[in-house]
Image (cartoon, rainbow, N blue to C red):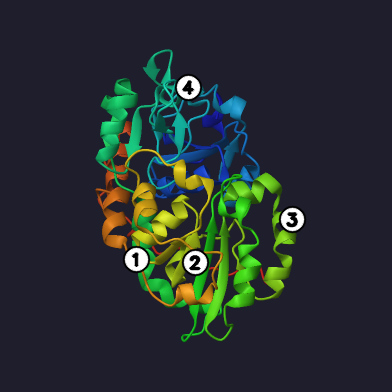
Amino acid sequence: MGIDAHQWVTRRGCRTVLAVAHTVTSCERVLEAVELLENDHRVQVVFTQAPDVFGNGVEDLLRAVGGVVLPWEQATRERFDLALAAAFGSLHRVHAPVVVMPHGAGYAKGHRSATGELRPYGLDTQRLLHNGKPTVSMVVLSHDNQLDLLREQCPEAVDVAEVIGDLCYDRLVASLPARAAYREALDVAPEQELVVVTSTWGAGSLFGTHLDLVPRLLDELPADRFQLAALAHPGVWFGHGPRQVKAWLADCVDAGLRLFAPELDWRAALVAADHVIGDLGSTTAYAAAIGKSVLLVETPLLSAIAGNAPHARLRDLAPRLRTDLPLAEQLTGRFDIAGEVAPIVTSRPGRAAGNLRQSCYRLLGLAEPGAHRALAAVSVPQNWCRS
């Protein structure tokens, strides 16, 4: 980058795409969008870390990615042909057509408006406007019903919104044929059932209110029938530090818990699972959407979901885990609500990659190449935490 950059690069004249990483979670979403563009010989992708209170872990993730990383202050002084983000902070400082996408299953987390009404975070004027104008060139929506929410909360941004679909959900579906490989990597025997405990971040999450559930499951579930895995939101890992999270769960790992480190793709565990026990985070919603039997744990999050999000449908339909009753007998049946939840996750199933690619190339001013790599299954987990 810079006025003399043409002297030092090998390929000149590339369109430049800036991948903006606010948090580990948002960076993971941005990386999936980057994969749709980066194999084009006409495109150069560079990365930057935007300021965010949950920015811990991003520097290490970007280093592992192996891309060119620009300091934020330098990135805000350059012009780019496109920018990709999955969070909203400071995007008005980016000099490029900006595409912003959700970093969860749609827009579900609620915030109170001035009138006290619970509104979904991310489709509001505070996030989408700067000086009365949209800060981005495209707001990615996963479902048609989000357009109605946008019209209510931020009508100024309706013209830059596009219903693309949900790339994360499509990737989960593409990974379903690899279920046996994921289970083998997690040492789950064919006759065993895998129970995955999943938690979002915050004091109202499963880990914030029911961390004792994990050792209790290990004690009560017969080892010859069940295996147990745990997924924690990156906000848990990097809010407290990986060392501390591992220390809190060290005895559980010694007892056989498959603890997914934050660098692993959590979707492999969902595909491998037979049962998912979780709060109302996006991971639990995705689990229900791909047909996993879900039990919800009572947490304050149950009353903090806004809008017509898949989390709301999950809250209304999924059975609750009774912590006052034996746990093993609550895992005897299967409860499949995929037919109710999946249609709320995306109204463009299987089409998110193609739709997003097409829109990005339009903003880049390039003809879309004719050949694309198929959406691949997520990687087989190799380094989950062992005793």
- Above or below for 10 versus 378: above
Residue at the spot of label 1: 291
Which numbered tag is attached to residue 243? 3
Between marks 4 and 3, how big is the CA–CA gap?
35 Å
Query: What amino acid is labelled 1 in the image?
Result: Gly
Residue 192 visible within the image = yes
Percent x, y for residue 334? Answer: 37, 73
Name the secondary structure under disc 2. helix
Closer to the observer: label 2 or label 1? 1
Name the secondary structure under disc 3. helix
* Contact? badges 3 and 1 (CB < 8 Å): no
Which numbered tag is attached to residue 269? 2
* Contact? badges 4 and 1 (CB < 8 Å): no
Q: Does residue 364 appear to the left or right of 96 in the view shown?
A: left
* Contact? badges 3 and 2 (CB < 8 Å): no
- Above or below for 212 versus 333: above
Percent x, y for residue 351? Answer: 26, 51
Mark 4, Cα crowd under 10 Å, few <14 / some 14-19 / many 20+, is some
Residue 384 visible within the image = no
Query: What amino acid is labelled 2 in the image?
Result: Ala
Residue at the spot of label 4: 92
Percent x, y for residue 195? Answer: 51, 71
Name the secondary structure under disc 4. helix
Task: State the image quarter where residue 319 is shown.
Answer: bottom left
- Above or below for 253 versus 45: below
Looking at the rendered image, the quarter that the N terminus falls into is top right
Dot 4 or dot 3, earlier in sequence: 4
Dot 2 or dot 1, earlier in sequence: 2
Closer to the observer: label 4 or label 3? 3
Task: State the image quarter where residue 203 is shown.
Answer: top right
Query: What amino acid is labelled 3 in the image?
Result: Arg
